Amino acid sequence: MRGLPGISLGCDYNFEQWPPEVWAEDVVLMREAGIDLVAVNIFGWSSIEPRPGEYDFTALDRVIGLLHRHGIRINLGTGTSSPPPWLTTRHPEILPVMADGTTRSPGGRQAWCPSSPVFRRHALALVEQVARRYGSHPAVVLWHVSNELGCHNALCYDEASAAAFRRWLEQRYVSIEALNKAWGTAFWSQRYDDWSEISPPRLALSARNPAQLVDFQRFSSDELLGWYRAEAAVLRRHTTAPVTTNFMVTAHIRNLDYWSWAPEMDVIANDHYLDHRLGDPVAELSFAADLTRGLAGGAPWMLMEQSAGAVNWQPHNLAKLPGQMLRNSLTHVARGADSLCFFQWRASVQGAEKFHSALVPHAGTDTVAWREVLDLSATLTTLDEVAGTTVRADVALLFSWESWWSADTEARPSQDVRYLAQVHAAYNAIRELGATADVVAPGADLSRYRLVVVPCLHMVSDADAAGLGAYVAGGGHAVVTFYSGIVDRSDRVRLGGYPGAFRDLLGVVAEEFFPLLPGDRVRLAGGGSAELWTERLRTTTAKTIDTYADGPLPGVPAITRNTHGEGAAWYVATALDPPSLRDLMDVALHEAGVRPIGAPGDGSVEVVRRAGGGRSYIFVINHGTQPIEYAATGRELTTGAAVSGLLRVPAGAVRVVREEPS
């Protein structure tokens, strides 16, 4: 990142929680830990504007000066992420309203409605003051708009949101007749005669209009993006430093369509925390990193937040085992990050996050945790030359927030079919086969990829579907999984049989969905098994690869392959068990000419290549409990050792080789 050396190391510093004598101690420790970048004023509003219109920058001035004198660069927050109590007391109308009509009280964070004009007026006044004061400060190399926008307040249902939603709809559809057609309001007597009759999709007695729900998600994403633009516009009047905000590309956050946000960012930054509620949190970390790289258009990106150890917000907040923080961190680097930052520098002693880990734990610096921070810092220094290179991938996986919203709507064939789970299943199969995937948007340029994987792409435009068809016809290979191509962007079912938009590409027609009950499985004639989903499928031009051996549809095709133009497209009409999906993906990779750089396995070993500027680096990350060997020639950066033919990677270790011709 501009203004930062090599692979940089950073953290959030909530200095407001500590007395000034601790600040001086902290900057010395930061230097010892090799901290390059510190984020401040993330939650500073009540400190720098203690009363309406009265600003006190004394403490922030002092901390910025202290960091600058010690050679530490600053990621300066605008401070608007959580309003101070005086604002919510004087203006309770800014508080967010939930779908059930209840108002959320202050006392947590993000207690504001994105459409509130009162909040916007006060927050932009604060941004103006902060930007004017520090816009040209030499230590400020990055501006941080708000914090985790939409984490808690993305969907607001108050009257200000209702008015903004109506304006957004009128811009989108122009006429009320066009809206009625797009929403299918002939159903259940929902036809509108005037824009004023439309409200946000608050909770109803029954299932709500699914097209309205998707549009409200779009509106809510756009509304917060509009807020980001408003803050950024103020900043750009006073600074030439890059401006960004921290995305939340992670399994439990889905309300913002980051494909539309990414072009607005000067730097793509993401927050990511291991989620132990998932079956394989390390695989999800890799997916999130690859998706973040996709948002960056393949360029290097920034990890704005991660944890040194446990978080505080999951049902069971597990500490990281020795070496795990380094492996997690270098997985992000392997998959494109050039900057690693942590929440936070020093563990809080009060507040909701007092049990969230930090670089300096409650027990201080004579700890395993602190020594691991020093080890990570030393390791990153050895990898500085990797900065600026990019990840190499021959596989693309299509991902869509709109499909996530649509596929997981209230009334659907099976509540057990969840979009992200199917995306993760396909991604994990690729990862366990040792291949690297770029995660890209529908409609992306696919020409450089040998294989494109399309998991559960429920909602897709005609143009994007045609783009995939043209890619395959031109010699590309694709794997499409069930519940894809079903609806257009108005959430309208495509007639003529499923999988709708992809029927011709795949050479199949499904007449009816046959979802399975929880716990039920079907056997396939080829020996595999599946769950969740089957469908009454027949081939038109495709070849049947496997059929159901039992269940509701014995003998019906479950896996097909279709020659389309110069290429081939596979269709998986059920949720295969992981080994069967991996086997199918292995065949598809081989046919497409993809040669994975990692060996097939259980995902405990990851191998990723970054390259650029005539240099090439192989990252080998061993999450397993046994040492492994990998064929490589070059110099191992973390140890400086020459590698001639075979690289040994101890259990739980990471090795990075600057490759040389063998």
Image: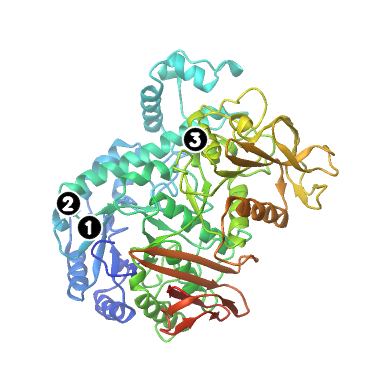
Q: Which mark is residue 129?
A: 2
Q: Give the mark nearest the N terminus, 2 or 1.
A: 1
Instruction: Tell me which amino acid carries mark 2.
Output: Gln
Q: Find residue 68 and report its horizontal and vertical position in percent.
A: 19, 71
> Which label sits in the foreground, 3 or 2?
3
> Which label sits in the foreground, 1 or 3?
3
Q: Is residue 549 left or right of residue 424?
A: right
Q: Which mark is residue 467?
A: 3
Instruction: Tell me which amino acid carries mark 3.
Output: Gly
Judged from the image, the secondary structure of the residue bearing numbered disc 3 is helix
Q: CA distance from mark 3 to mark 2?
A: 47 Å
* Residue nearest the observer in this picture, 405 or 660: 660
Asked where in the image residue 516 lies, by quadrant, the reply is top right
Q: Are marks 2 and 1 in contact (CB under 8 Å)?
A: yes
Asked where in the image residue 205 lies, by quadrant, the reply is top right
Q: Quadrant of the N terminus?
A: bottom left
Q: Which mark is residue 629?
A: none
Q: Residues within 10 Å of mark 1 (few under 14, many from 20)?
A: many
Q: Give the mark nearest the N terminus, 1 or 3.
A: 1
Q: Find residue 434 and report its horizontal and vertical position in percent.
A: 58, 63
Q: Is residue 573 left or right of residue 236?
A: right
- Total marks shown come to 3
Structure colour scheme: rainbow
